[in-house]
Image (tube, grey):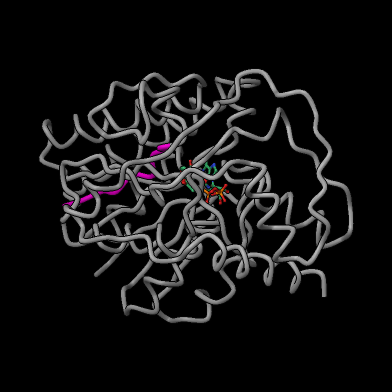
Amino acid sequence: MRVIVTGAAGFIGSHLADRLVADGHRVTGLDDLSTGKLENLSGARKSKLFGFHRFDVTSSDLPVLVARDEPDVVLHLAAQMDVRKSVADPLHDTRTNVLGTVNVLEACARAGVPRVVFASSGGTVYGTPPKLPASERMTLHPTSPYGSAKAAGETYVAAYQRLHGLAGCSLRLGNVYGPRQDPHGEAGVVGIFAGALAKGQPTKVFGDGTSSRDYVYVDDVVDAFVRCLGGKGDGRRLNIGSGTGTTVRQLHTLVARAVGAPDAPEFAPSRAGELQAITLDVGQARRALGWEPVVGLEQGLAQTIEWVRSRKR
Ligand SMILES: NC(=O)c1ccc[n+]([C@@H]2O[C@H](COP(=O)([O-])OP(=O)(O)OC[C@H]3O[C@@H](n4cnc5c(N)ncnc54)[C@H](O)[C@@H]3O)[C@@H](O)[C@H]2O)c1
């Protein structure tokens, strides 16, 4: 297949590019390198199947690329992904995360691209769900411009399917962690704990440590995108997580154990606006995609810590 990946130089996008190339697909990556790094693509760029373009996803270069490439599917991951930045500068967030998404969809519709898969956020679109795990049937109550932009993106994907017949799927990702992750992303705490503990530096837990998240390993997320290539997710919004909540205190214990460091974080007052708990019901993704998260937290953390250590060498 011919695939365009937006946000290809980022954490998840680069793993996706690696997997697609390994599976024999022709991949065009685009990224403005605002947070992404070319070094993330050092593996993919060795392949003749991979090409890279540096530009802004909101620019007029995008429809030109899509029309020229005639992809079978566009996987749209380019985004401003820092929730705090979205609160500090909502217009910048909206420009990239809403206008960028509309630019992608419009380009696909005009070029007759059959399908698009959108990286949404299970950690932010629900807000505080009435019960856990959060299911796709629940009403969305985002509490940040970032979450609102992801919820809007999903409705644009659905509207373009109805309006233009552009098949679309939105994957509501949990807190994704793994090698190459950015400490400012939604699962940034894994990178922060791992980086600090590996260097023997102090760590801080905000609040009493009971707030919990649904951590999902990046390879499992990549597998969900790959399963959507042929249309299994069309017309759906699917949670992609582990289905289990892990508290920040438990996470610290697991990271400290894997690093071989003392499990003794400092506690600091909780930060305003932080969600108390989120866990995602992944039953629909199981049924629709035949997808299953297969990498357990301890195994995934060990692989992430190995990567953190390899960067220090
Ligand atoms: N990491 C998570 O836990 C998580 C959770 C839910 C959803 N997501 C979503 O998954 C996608 C990938 O996230 P990630 O964690 O890999 O983040 P990331 O920042 O590593 O990747 C995003 C990429 O988009 C690029 N980008 C940003 N603005 C751009 C623009 N205007 N034009 C072109 N490229 C631009 C960045 O340079 C970066 O390479 C994002 O859409 C994010 O919102 C991530």
Q: Nearer the viewer, residue 29 or 239?
A: 239
Number of marks in the rendered image: 0
Instruction: Using the image, determine if residue 185 lies above or below residue 151.
Output: below
In screen coordinates, is 236 left or right of 273? left
Q: Image quadrant of residue 162?
A: top left
Residue at 31%, 74% (x, y): give it.
Answer: 25
Residue 190, percent from left and from top: 65, 51
Q: Position of residue 14 (x, y in %)?
A: 51, 63
Q: Say which quarter of the image contains residue 27.
A: bottom left
- Picture coordinates of residue 248, whole percent (x, y): 64, 41
Image position, residue 60 (x, y; %) = 41, 40
Nearest the eye: 237 or 270: 270
Quarter of the rendering occupied by the C terminus: bottom right
Q: Residue at x 40, y 28 (%)?
A: 125
Which residue is at a point 87% across and 61% down the rendered structure image? 199
Q: Quadrant of the N terminus?
A: bottom left
- Most frequent secondary structure within the magenta stretch: strand
Does residue 32 sit above or below 205 in this rendering? below
Q: Which residues are magenta?
A: 114-122
